[in-house]
């Protein structure tokens, strides 16, 4: 990976270096569409005739013009590539040293080749770098086959997913995950369970937006990740079916069917998918607390059965007015179990004390459903109005059976403690929003408002078996927690192109929050966090300035202020035992964290993006590991300020007509300054990583792909130092049956380098941890597309639940 990254940087430097030794020549030309209208942003590649290897690359300007300088006399050919158009090649030509050569103007034709009435579109690039976001087109990746949405995030440029399924972007936690423009208000565990239930066959693309404008909800200090699910965009009746098989430690399967009907007045679309399988992971924790050492080793199993349904309809009243309805449902039936063995020693002498053998069996089911009604008005003057009304619900039911057995020297049972609990969760989310865009002067004005109302009900009933094996409810450990939250927001955003070189965007969002949490203990005891009320107003400015220095160089400076509110269940101050020595608890006094982000991006030739950023986080909140008596617990706490400096370089360079690739490298430096309780915390640590993807057209409808990722040593949750990890995937794809069917075969983590290691030494608690999951797999996927393939555009809309759905735990 290091050699490949170095090669990429060397290639970038070679492209940008000026010709010094010879008198420079010049090659120029223009590119247009088949109506002779100039085409902007066409990738123009200067190639060597003998092997089509890349010499230089350029991007056509507003007038369709492009230009190259040459170092010496040589022969060349030129390729022209743009999504939606057929790639075209020039005849070979020869340029003498110092000469000026004008290429014959070329016209690109829309990529529509009819095969017995079927229209085929051009393939999207796997990675697209845009001014405001990076897009990972999942359909274009072979190695994405058979993955779930959480694994896709780990394969996305600049994204990281740690061993506890926490998601970060460019080294920053607090990423808000959207699905079809709707924020998932789930905590880490339930969000991970939901994302694992979405198969890659149902995902069209993943959008990564590090500095969203004021139009977006202010949640998410690291930015936004939007997972776009597939929605057919074709006239007539059509659809597709997918079947997949994955072999890891255990076999797993998935399948889906998508159907679509569309004409000039109505669009009906649906997608039904399911996956089933058992997933295993291991966890090893060696911790020293006071004078005692605990050597915990666990094998965890998650037996999943998930069912997803998405259905909707759009009715086009006329060419200005559209109404639509959309419903998405995810039903999961899962059983999580853990088998743990923990020998306990007196640390000064290493003498064996006792052994804890614990089992935790947690059967449960989750239902997550969202319903949307949308109205859209758009006219030819540039005015667009969108109104959304949404209702979302989450229903979770879970029961835990958790016996603990303590054994002595001769493996004799000393005593046992058997715990049980029941944890039902009901969450309802109501939102309404309106967004307006219209021309104002020489720019575009956007403004809107939103209101949301959330109610959550959590119960935690804790039981311990008595000597007769009968569960007895422990009243001082059982409670009910109700939480209500109302957020009202309004925003304004203005964009304008000042001239050919300068453009600006500025916005301001106001959010007013009212919340109340009420804890009712079964034993009737009143404590400080029984009722916690909050009411506050925040303002979130954002701005962007773009400067086109030269046709090959663009600078983009962005700033935004963001907020991360606690998940609903993290505010519930219950204690939940994982085993007798480990538990987690909520924190009713958890405060929102605020982040100021600023980034400067340089774009070279529309191909290489280099970003330098700085973030300051106030009231940084994370999961903290601490101790009490002889037990260890985890809890979300506001513990510090966090400052992050990051650098990111990404490029999708065309190598030649049969070989293309993408490379991304990143570096960050994190600085924490605060305290956990009375224990001071001051940590500075760097982090770095890389992502590389290469695609090969092999001929006869075969394509291949190799991709890999690497994360260097870093820090997690302020006190944990993580070791390097990474992975390499390979895949092969074959099209057949007139390109209506696809078979993909891939192997993941072929060198088995993804398992993780970490250690923490803070406040008298030392922990060495490691673990692994089923990262090394073989996957086979079959897709068949049927019906009409005539491509027509379909409207892209976001629902109103785009700030509330990720905070469900």
Image: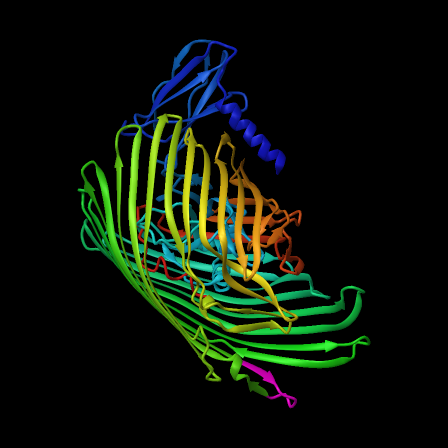
As for residue 182 lying within the magenta part, the answer is no
Query: Taking the image as drawn, is residue 324 in sight?
Result: no
Identify the residue at image location x=34%, y=27%: 61
For this orientation, the residue located farthest to the front is: 678
Q: Position of residue 519 (x, y in %)?
A: 43, 76
Relative to residue 129, is residue 797 drawn left or right? left
Whether residue 543 is visible here, answered yes or no, is yes
For residue 464: magenta?
yes
Q: Nearer the viewer, residue 8 or 259?
A: 8
Q: Quadrant of residue 300?
A: bottom right
Nearer-the-camera pick, 272 or 131: 131
Taking the image as shown, residue 311 lies to the left or right of residue 96, namely left
Vertical position of residue 528 compared to residue 701: above or below: below
> On the rendered structure, is 688 left or right of 616?
right
Left-right relation of 800 to 346: left
Figure quadrant of residue 600: top left
Place of residue 685 in the rendered image (x, y in percent of width and height, measured from the top left): 58, 45
Residue 290: horizontal and vertical position, in percent? 69, 65
Quadrant where the N terminus lies?
top right
Vertical order, 23 against 494 (above or below): above
**Magenta region, residue range:** 462-470
Q: Residue 732, relative to residue 336: is it above or below? A: above
- The quarter holding residue 425 reads bottom left
Where residue 564 sits: x, y (%)?
Answer: 41, 56
Residue at coordinates 61% horizontally, 61% vertically from top-left? 251
**Number of numbered labels in the structure image:** 0
For the point 67% across and 73% down, which residue is it? 358
Work out which residue is located at the far bottom of the displayed protein and give it: 468
Q: Nearer the viewer, residue 249 or 297?
A: 297
Nearest the viewer among 306 and 208 is 208
């Amino acid at each position: 990976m290091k050699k490949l990254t170095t090669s990429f940087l060397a290639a970038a430097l070679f492209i940008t270096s000026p010709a010094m030794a010879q008198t420079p020549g010049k090659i120029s030309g223009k590119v247009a569409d088949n109506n002779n209208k100039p085409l902007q942003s066409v990738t123009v590649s200067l190639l060597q005739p003998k092997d089509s290897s890349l010499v230089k690359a350029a991007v056509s300007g507003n007038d369709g013009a492009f230009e190259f300088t040459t170092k010496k006399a040589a022969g060349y050919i030129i390729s022209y590539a743009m999504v939606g158009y057929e790639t075209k090649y020039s005849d070979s030509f020869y340029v003498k040293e110092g000469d000026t050569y004008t290429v014959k103007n070329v016209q690109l034709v829309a990529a529509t080749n009819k095969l017995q009435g079927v229209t085929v579109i051009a393939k999207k690039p796997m990675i697209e770098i845009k001014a405001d976001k990076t897009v990972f087109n999942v359909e274009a990746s072979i190695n994405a086959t058979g993955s779930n949405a959480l694994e896709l995030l780990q394969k996305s440029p600049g994204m990281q997913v740690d061993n506890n399924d926490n998601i970060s972007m460019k080294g920053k936690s607090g990423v808000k995950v959207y699905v079809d423009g709707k924020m998932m208000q789930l905590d880490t565990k339930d969000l991970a369970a939901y994302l694992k239930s979405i198969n890659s066959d149902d995902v069209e693309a993943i959008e990564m937006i590090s500095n969203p404008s004021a139009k977006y909800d202010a949640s998410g200090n690291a930015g936004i990740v939007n997972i776009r699910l597939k929605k057919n965009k074709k006239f007539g009746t059509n659809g597709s079916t997918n079947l997949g098989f994955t072999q890891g430690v255990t076999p797993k399967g998935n399948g889906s069917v998508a159907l679509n009907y569309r004409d000039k007045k109505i669009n009906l679309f649906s997608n039904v998918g399911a996956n089933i399988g058992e997933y295993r992971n291991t966890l090893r924790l060696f911790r020293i607390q006071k004078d005692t050492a605990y050597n915990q080793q666990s094998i965890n199993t998650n037996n999943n059965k998930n069912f997803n349904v998405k259905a909707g309809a759009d009715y086009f009243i006329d060419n200005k007015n559209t109404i639509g309805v959309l419903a998405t449902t995810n039903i999961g039936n899962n059983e999580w179990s853990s088998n743990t063995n923990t020998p306990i020693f007196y640390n000064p002498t290493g003498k064996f004390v006792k052994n804890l053998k614990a089992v935790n069996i947690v059967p449960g089911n989750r239902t997550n459903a969202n319903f949307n009604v949308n109205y859209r008005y758009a006219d030819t003057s540039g005015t667009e109005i969108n109104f959304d009304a949404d209702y979302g619900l989450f229903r979770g039911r879970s029961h835990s059976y958790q016996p603990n057995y303590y054994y002595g020297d001769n493996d004799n049972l000393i005593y046992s403690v058997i715990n049980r609990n029941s944890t039902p969760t009901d969450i309802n989310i109501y939102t309404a929003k309106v967004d307006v865009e219209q021309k104002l002067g020489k720019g575009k004005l956007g403004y809107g408002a939103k209101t949301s109302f959330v109610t959550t009900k959590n119960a935690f009933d804790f039981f311990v078996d008595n000597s007769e094996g009968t569960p007895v409810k422990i009243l001082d450990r059982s409670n009910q927690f109700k939480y209500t939250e109302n957020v009202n927001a309004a925003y304004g955003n203005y964009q304008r192109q000042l001239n050919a070189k300068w453009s600006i965007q500025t916005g301001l969002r106001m959010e007013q929050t009212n919340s109340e949490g009420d804890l009712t203990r079964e034993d009737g005891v009143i404590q400080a966090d029984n009722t916690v009320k909050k009411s506050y107003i925040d303002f979130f400015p954002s701005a962007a300035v773009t400067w086109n220095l030269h046709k090959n160089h663009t600078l983009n400076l962005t700033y935004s202020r963001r907020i991360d509110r606690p998940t609903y269940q993290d505010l519930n101050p219950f204690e939940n035992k994982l085993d007798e020595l480990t538990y987690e608890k909520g924190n009713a006094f958890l405060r929102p964290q605020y982040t100021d982000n600023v980034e400067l991006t340089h774009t070279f030739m529309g191909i290489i993006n280099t970003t330098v950023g700085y973030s300051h986080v106030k009231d940084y909140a994370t999961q903290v590991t601490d101790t009490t008596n002889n037990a260890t617990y985890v809890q979300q706490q506001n513990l510090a300020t966090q400052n992050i400096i990051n650098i990111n370089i990404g490029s999708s360079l065309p190598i030649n007509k049969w070989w293309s690739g993408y490379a991304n490298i990143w570096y960050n430096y994190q600085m924490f300054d605060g305290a956990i309780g009375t224990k001071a915390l001051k940590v500075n640590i760097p982090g770095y990583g890389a992502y590389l993807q290469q695609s090969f057209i092999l001929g006869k409808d075969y394509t291949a792909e190799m991709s890999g990722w690497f994360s260097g040593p870093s820090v997690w949750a302020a006190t944990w130092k993580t070791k390097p990890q990474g992975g390499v995937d390979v895949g092969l794809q074959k099209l057949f049956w007139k390109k209506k069917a696809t078979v993909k075969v891939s192997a993941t983590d072929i060198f088995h380098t993804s398992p993780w290691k970490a250690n923490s030494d803070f406040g008298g608690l030392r922990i060495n941890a490691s673990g692994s999951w089923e990262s090394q797999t073989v996957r086979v996927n079959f897709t068949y597309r049927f019906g009409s393939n005539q491509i027509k555009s379909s409207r892209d809309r976001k629902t109103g639940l785009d700030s509330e759905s990720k905070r469900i735990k």
